[in-house]
Amino acid sequence: MPPSEEAPYTLIYWPEIPGRGEHVRLAFEEAGVAYTDTAREKDGVNEVLSRIGPSNLGDGLNPPMFAPPMLQHGDLVINQTSNILLYLGPKLGLAPKPGDQDAHGILFVNELTLTALDGLSNEVHDCHHPIGSGLYYEDQKEESLRKSKDYVSTRLPKFLSYFERVLKSKASGDGPWLYGGKLTYADLVLFQCIDGIHFMFPKALKKLQDSNDYAAVFTLYDAVKERPRIKAYLTSDRRQKYSMGIYRSYPELDVTD
Amino acid sequence: MPPSEEAPYTLIYWPEIPGRGEHVRLAFEEAGVAYTDTAREKDGVNEVLSRIGPSNLGDGLNPPMFAPPMLQHGDLVINQTSNILLYLGPKLGLAPKPGDQDAHGILFVNELTLTALDGLSNEVHDCHHPIGSGLYYEDQKEESLRKSKDYVSTRLPKFLSYFERVLKSKASGDGPWLYGGKLTYADLVLFQCIDGIHFMFPKALKKLQDSNDYAAVFTLYDAVKERPRIKAYLTSDRRQKYSMGIYRSYPELDVTD
């Protein structure tokens, strides 16, 4: 049975980092739609662990899940960041709906989201964990430095150039947004990625910003930050601080030459 | 204007490797639906390059694209492997349709696909390119060995365990498939990932297979391989050989202890 549209939304994610859960939070916050965030509840860690543990086989509707974030809505439990946003986007007014005139717009929003997550989130995580996500940073520091140098000098400019190109394309429409002249969740994802990179590589990102080659990307960043609900959220205690998640502050990795 | 359902399908991908394009090929082959594959055409490389070059700004409908695979269908050009499959799956009978009784099934098929690509494709690529995708393997051999050791001893078993758990879940239904008792494109994706890992880490994978801890995963692999159209495809000259793509044969990385 599909969930009633009135069912409450629950985000299930690790406490104490914004992480990939943040992309889901920003969608709810921009839409002004209420949600429960287990990261802020007592026993939040166990809520995650019980869902991904080896004895959890899901149920007749939902397959078991590999890792958070997860979204519970009625009977549905949905996993994978881009997949959660694909489900939520049209409901929250943050992506074209299947019945809209722009029936395929959701595919483009999903495509832009996947590329942002690939290049500006997953690859950034690998800058401090290039050898193994289960090993300590201290055990892969040298490799992290090599990876970070490559990332900020070649990969980061490549992805920023790509999004600059998207923002200059006809399909992006008017205004600062990536697709169709309207704010979509892909814009929120790109904002969050740039924000995280700003935390992890402040000097390297500043240098790229100062080059003025990516002016449209930074205009989008500012435009999201100034959205009234996002602005209020970012200064609220609902916004988790960066710590030991995807985006980490290791000043030795913030190389500019 | 959305594409007519009769419009021809064109896959745009790098020549001479199965790569991420292979997931799209397997969907067409299993469905018995005709498609053009630019990888097999004269000038196939330039077809890709012209689509991702800095001067390509897409058009009024389609944003520019970051990297292949891409699917052209009528006026639409869709990018990102999982996104192409999300579009094609219901059309090819390889995923529930939005109007089906199982209206949210497509989300689960997408979720399983994303997890397979994360853990059994992207992470495998990083085993021979942990430092930079633009650097030579020879310049990151030591790091590749460390990464591969971690991958085959911790990450690969973790992902295989996860899919074993999915296959034992109620949501997987009867038979060898991941979701809903029917073959979906998620099964084809998992098959292709295991096949590639078999090429890259034959000894390490054999050891995991012999443990019998992942019997359902290997049963699925065999069941896909025996599908009549897939079987015919795999022995045809349409199937590209593994070479210097995601899955590479570097025997020194195939460690078993």
Image (cartoon, coloured by chain):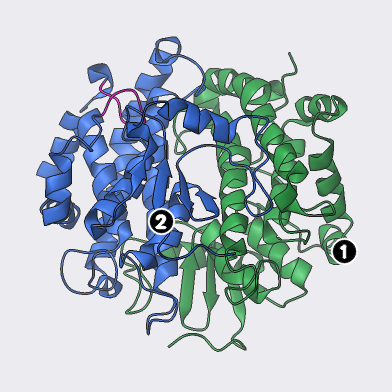
Chain colours: A blue, B green
Amino acid found under the numbered disc labelled 1: Ala
- Quarter occupied by residue B16: bottom right
Residue B116: where, in percent of width, then height?
62, 45
Q: Between A170 and A122, which is closer to the camera in this rendering? A: A122
Residue B92: in magenta span: no
Amino acid found under the numbered disc labelled 2: Leu
Question: In what quadrant of the picture does the C terminus of chain B appear?
Answer: top right
Answer with left or right where residue B256 lies relative to residue B128. right
Residue A96: where, in percent of width, then height?
36, 73
- Say which residue appears at 41% left-offset and 31% top-offset: A14
Q: Between A145 and A200, which is closer to the camera in this rendering? A: A200
* Residue labelled with disc 1: B232
Residue A65: where, in percent of width, then height?
59, 41
- Say which residue appears at 31% left-offset and 51% top-offset: A189
Q: Which residues are magenta?
A: A242-249
* Kind of element beneath mark 2: helix
- Please, which chain is the residue tagged with disc 2 on? A
Q: Is residue B90 above or below residue A244?
A: below
Q: Is residue A159 above or below residue B200?
A: below
Q: Is residue A155 above or below residue B139?
A: below
Q: Is residue B212 above or below residue A178?
A: above
- Say which residue appears at 27% left-offset and 61% top-offset: A165
* Residue labelled with disc 2: A85
- Say which residue appears at 29% left-offset and 25% top-offset: A248
Report if residue A161 is visible in the image. Answer: no
Question: In what quadrant of the picture does the N terminus of chain B appear?
Answer: bottom left
Residue A140: where, in percent of width, then height?
44, 15
Q: Between B119 and B173, which is closer to the camera in this rendering? A: B173
